[in-house]
Image (cartoon, rainbow, N blue to C red):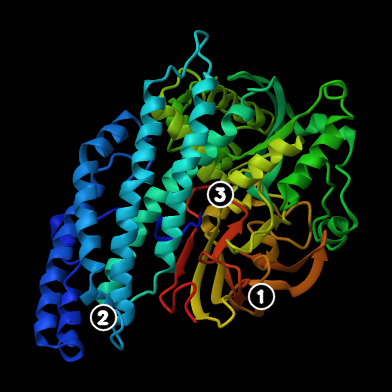
Amino acid sequence: MSRHSAEHGHMPRSHGKRRHVWPWIVLVVLVAVAAVGAVSALTLYRQAMEVKAHEERAISLMAGLKGLSGSSASGVGKDTVDSINAVLPQLQAETAAAQHITEGTLWSVASHMPVYDKDIATVRGMTRIVHQLTTKPLPQLADTLSTLANASLTTDDGSLNLEPITQAAASMKAANQPLQQLVQQYDALPRPNIGKIATAYDAGRKQLTTAGTTIDDLSNALDIIPGFLGSGGAKTYAVMAMTTSEARSSGGLLGSVGVMTTDNGKISIGDFRSNTEYIPYGAGDPTADEQRIFNQWGPLQMSFDMRDLAVYPDAQRSAEGMRVIWQRTPWGANQHLDGVIMVDPVFLQKMVAINGQVTLSDGRVLTGDNTAEFLLNTVYKEYPVSMQDQYFTEVATQSISAMFSNINLTKLTQVGQAMSSLAQGRHFSMYSFDEATENSLKSAGFTASTPDDEANPKIGVYITEQNPSKMDWYVHRTTKITRSSCNGDGSQTYHVEYTLNNTLTSSALATLPDYIAGGIQVPSLARGMAAEKMLIYAPAGGSIANITTSGNGTVSVAPKQTTMNGKTVTTTLALLNPGKSLTYSFDVTTSPKATTDLGVDQTPMGWEDSGVSVDTSACAIGAK
């Protein structure tokens, strides 16, 4: 499902706001007098007021659905089921009444009026889609969640009971599929000309996207959780701990690797070993293209040993490199590796928020608010290098072990939705060496890769820090995407502005240790300088053109095209001293097969906000 810029919005809650959703109908009716005659126009006006009343009541009812109407951080639980069942009959009645009116002959005639035909068509589409949502997907969802709420999800030993999860996954998928289709149909409606109609359209889109994203995340997680937790037998995963404050394409430098075993719902966390224990066992067999781009081109020459395995933008390549090294080690030579899990401190922070605070061995308490900053910045300021991996291990062991223990429906949905949403942001990624399992992971969005989906277009922007440091904590990245045209072949063209900003100040730099500030190992790179080697990918089946740069940073290597592992990619090197920024501007054209708005897949930062904004007001997908 697409993730639009509106996905973080909330459903309208105050009656003061809701009463402004439909007054545009008055404007339409005034124009309709000339098109259909005064008597018919008055009838249209009266019916429009009835539609307005039905839709406002429906919006009010939907706004009260627990866990579906706003932030889903609190999870979806029994109260979600209760709230759906409580309002469903009235909700269906209101939306049916609105649809019945807009399907009438008068509205059909009005939909062919010049200028306002698109606006009328959009209103008719909105009432149809919202009613369909209430008649099938919503009741199916309530039934599935009710079954899970009444099931025993925890076994006697505190593990997750996989049987009801497996059964619920199929029914959740059956409810989710039509829901996502309705969201896509809504997105494809013509965006209206009249400003207030456009506002109503956008509000409805935000509302549907919020609910749709929540259910899609949950459905994807339920689909992969049983296999992940060993429903078919014990599984062994390498847990690769990334620090995004020293960026690598898929996340960050790998500080340590742990072993996680799952068996019929139970998670066991084995030892985490420092990357220094893996270094003697060599590199992860890079391809010739990877050698050229990441080693030969410099300025920092990647070793491709354990520290640099996340330099690949495809999780599959990181996993393959991990397995090569794993098999050379004494502890891995006789232990089959089923797959890898790549996590960063943002993922751990989310697990801490769900499971409860973590107390470190020195008494420091980490919460769902401060864990990421501690692991990505504070630990490098306050603790010696020898202690840093220990604290990451303590947090990872406690938070991952508790993910599925002593669980109920609310916690299950919190964990499942967090896994899915954080996978979208590359804070968490999985790869399985079993083909069938990997197909499920890939389909659910849990395996990070360079853009490969023409229907859901994304540009890929992947960063590898060239100044050995922890400077990427201070580099904030924002993306502004503006749709400029809807083309005759069905493709879309967008203008993209991708900005990197080194937020470190000169005064703060003076207080930082070299371990954070860098400027030691590569003589040409100064303390406090972020040196960002960038890989920029066009969306699958699409193209990038007209790349320009602006800002007070330095473009050390101008954008140039090359290939890596069969795909065309643009590479460049940006140098950012404290307080400096650079913006890369370019035009993107999607595949004609695109059905969603353009998005961004990028190296994660040290927080959940991706910094992406999207303006699609120029035209609607499918419009020519």
Quarter of the image for residue 259 reads top right
Mark 1 is surrounded, within 10 Å at the Cα level, by few (under 14), some (14 to 19) or many (20 or more) other residues, namely many
The answer to whether one can see residue 492 in this image is yes
Report the disc number at residue 346.
none
Residue 39 picture location, percent across and down: 9, 83
Q: CA distance from mark 3 to mark 2?
A: 44 Å
Mark 3 lies on residue: 424
Q: Residue at x 56, y 22 (%)?
A: 401
Q: Is residue 195 left or right of residue 486?
A: left
Q: Secondary structure at mark 3?
A: helix
Above or below, comparing residue 496 to residue 410 in the picture: below
Above or below, comparing residue 371 to residue 298 in the picture: above
Above or below, comparing residue 609 to residue 491 in the picture: above
Residue 59 picture location, percent across and down: 23, 54
Q: Residue at x 23, y 55 (%)?
A: 96
Q: CA distance from mark 1 to mark 2?
A: 43 Å
Mark 1 lies on residue: 544
Residue 127 picture location, percent across and down: 28, 62
From the viewer's perspective, is the residue at label 1 or at label 2 nearer?
2
Q: Is residue 299 left or right of residue 4?
A: right
Between 252 and 48, the residue placed more toward the observer is 48
Q: Secondary structure at mark 1?
A: strand
Between 279 and 497, the residue placed more toward the observer is 497
Residue 498 picture location, percent across and down: 57, 69
Q: CA distance from mark 1 to mark 3?
A: 22 Å
Disc 3 residue type (three-letter): Gln
**Sequence-wise first label, 1 or 2:** 2
Report the disc number at residue 109.
2
Mark 2 is surrounded, within 10 Å at the Cα level, by few (under 14), some (14 to 19) or many (20 or more) other residues, namely few
Q: Secondary structure at mark 2?
A: helix
Disc 1 residue type (three-letter): Ile
